[in-house]
Amino acid sequence: MQIYVNIITLASLYCLICCGYVLIYRASRVLNLAHGEMMTIGGYFLFTVSIGIIADPIPSFLLSFLLSLLLGFVVYFFLMRFMTGESVFAAVLVTVALGILMRGLITLIWTSQLWHPLQHLDMENTSHQIAEGAVISTFGVVTILSTIVLYLGLFLCFKFTRWGLRMRAVGEKPLLAAQRGFGLHKFYALSWGIAVFSGGLAGMIQACDSGLDPSMFVIGLKAFPVVLVGGLDSLVGVIPGAFVVAAAEVLAINYISPQASEVAPFAVLLAMLLIRPWGLFGTKEELERV
Amino acid sequence: MAFASGYFKTSYAKDLSIVETRSRWICLLLLILGLAVFPFFASPFFLDLATQVFLALIGAVALMLLTGYAGQISLGHAGLIAAGAFTTAILFKELKAPLFVTLPASGLVGGLLGIIFGLPSLRLKGLYLALSTLALHFIVVYLGAEYESTRGYATGVVIDPPSLGPLIIQDPRLWYFVLLIIDILVVIFAINLVRSRTGRAWMAIRDRDVAAEALGIKVSAYKLSAFVLSSVLTSIAGCLFAYFRGFVSVEAFSLLMTIEYIAMIIIGGLGSILGTVFGTIFVVLLPYIIDILVDALNVPARLTTYMFAIKYASFGLVMIIFLVLEPAGLVGIWRRVRDYFMLWPFRYRPLGG
């Protein structure tokens, strides 16, 4: 029973993180390998806000959301904007380099100590008995709930609002969208903003759940197999992808070894790339095939 | 020297030669002479730096052949170095194997892994290929970690210095010369390879694979050959890495190592062996340059405890600067500067010159 709960919590954490990968990929065909670091920075935003500005949980969360969103805009306008038109590999490498830069800055600003933002927010992370032999932490529940809210929100946004429609158009055919008079940079920046926001949200929840240190970015790295399993350009695909990867990871912890659980996502990724490289829900034409 | 009017080749032998003019021969001989006497004048610190550059250069040339010439992106380079290092460590610990066994064995393991790393390239390209090699990196490193933990070398495997016949390679100066000779061989091999049939086929595939196939190049065979060749070289570099450090542990083969090697070829300038040399020197020396800068700038003491983070951040920053502002890399800067002086008072090379 506990295994199922663990799989669901981990899967929803992956969903939160991976939504960022997909949004950026759909907009600009770049896989943002600095996403793990951006998620970590989200956690540190919450920590800084909670000790420095306001200790009340809800406003401090909201302020950190805003900061994450801003970080996304800043990264796009001051860095990734210059990479439009360059080769995809160069753009991906820029995100890798950005990740290294951010990891260094995180250690410089916040040191490599383990912090617990929860202490400053006057909240506690208690465990709840939900069924026979199954325990879930408060922030485990928060992860699941916020995943549901985020995905519902994104779905409604993309489906029914004018901005959502435009974002989809920009992702699908940038040239045609530009000819219709949409400012591409605006929409790309918005994708980056929402992506970093959702990653930051994952980072904040993870920071509340199990503390905050610079090594958190590894979760982001382990999460990208999820997007490939689901299909790089499919937001819906993230959900089954997250379940497959989370299941592989949790089962590897339980039945093989903790060491094996570190590579389980990548084994799944490799299997997926060999069988169905475009992922469960991705579009086949999207793939650069030989 | 090739001046503005151009250097005209008057015989087939001249067309085939690597070193073209007498002045270049003189420069080259001076360079080799300089490298040969360097260890007798340099302090142990500089000797160690030079040896590190030589060690990294082997792997960097291998990656340049794969990414810069064959156009196949690999994020699994550290995995291949780990494969070579762990082959050496395992053979040494289990069988007490000497250097002349471990070196070819590492190459063999590298070649086999190269086939595995290369197989996805037959179906995928670009981003997807890069990610499949990244997944393989994690799997290779995991296998190494499993070996460490099951055999009880939790902190790492210690390896004795290698011996060539009666000669034990332990003295830093000896290491310097051994690696220098290997490097010269590797560079000559690479330069000759990229102007041979294989190298030109790789470049054709890099530039446009469909056109390459239309020209009669067996794309899949050449792609695999690029992976195998690069992996063999990389694993041999891993074997030497294991002996040089005398210690093998999975922590050394992180993703950062891959990124460092990629940085070497990007900063150096893709598609140039000379660029690889520049890039390797730059990336290996960068942490030490930052040390000197930090000393010179009187950075507050509080920050110097985080030197590691400063180096990390500036490494990322330098990489971003090169990717955004100078995609042609150091070799691009070098060519511009050289052309400026050589062509003066003209600004551009004559067509076909």
Image: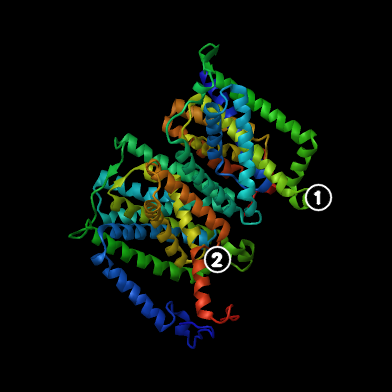
| Residue B195 located left or right of residue B100 | right
Q: Is residue A73 above or below residue A288?
A: above
- For the point 47% across and 47% down, which residue is it? B313
Instruction: Tell me which amino acid carries mark 1.
Output: Gly
Closer to us: A75 or A264: A75
Task: Please say if the residues under marks 2 and 1 sit with CB atoms less than 8 Å apart.
Answer: no
Disc 2 to disc 1, C-alpha distance:
40 Å
- For the point 53% across and 35% down, which residue is it? A40
Name the quarter where the N terminus of chain B is drawn.
bottom left
Foreground: disc 2 or disc 1: 1
- For the point 53% across and 55% down, which residue is it? B321
Residue where numbered disc 1 is placed: A181
Name the quarter where the C terminus of chain B is drawn.
bottom right
Residue where numbered disc 2 is placed: B203
Q: Residue furthest bottom?
A: B10
Q: Is residue B208 above or below residue B304?
A: below
Expressed as whole percent of the image width and height from the top left, the position of residue B19 reads 42, 78
Residue B76 in sight in this render: no
> Mark 2 belongs to which subunit?
B
| Residue A40 located left or right of residue B174 | right
Residue A205 in sight in this render: yes
Instruction: Tell me which amino acid carries mark 2.
Output: Met
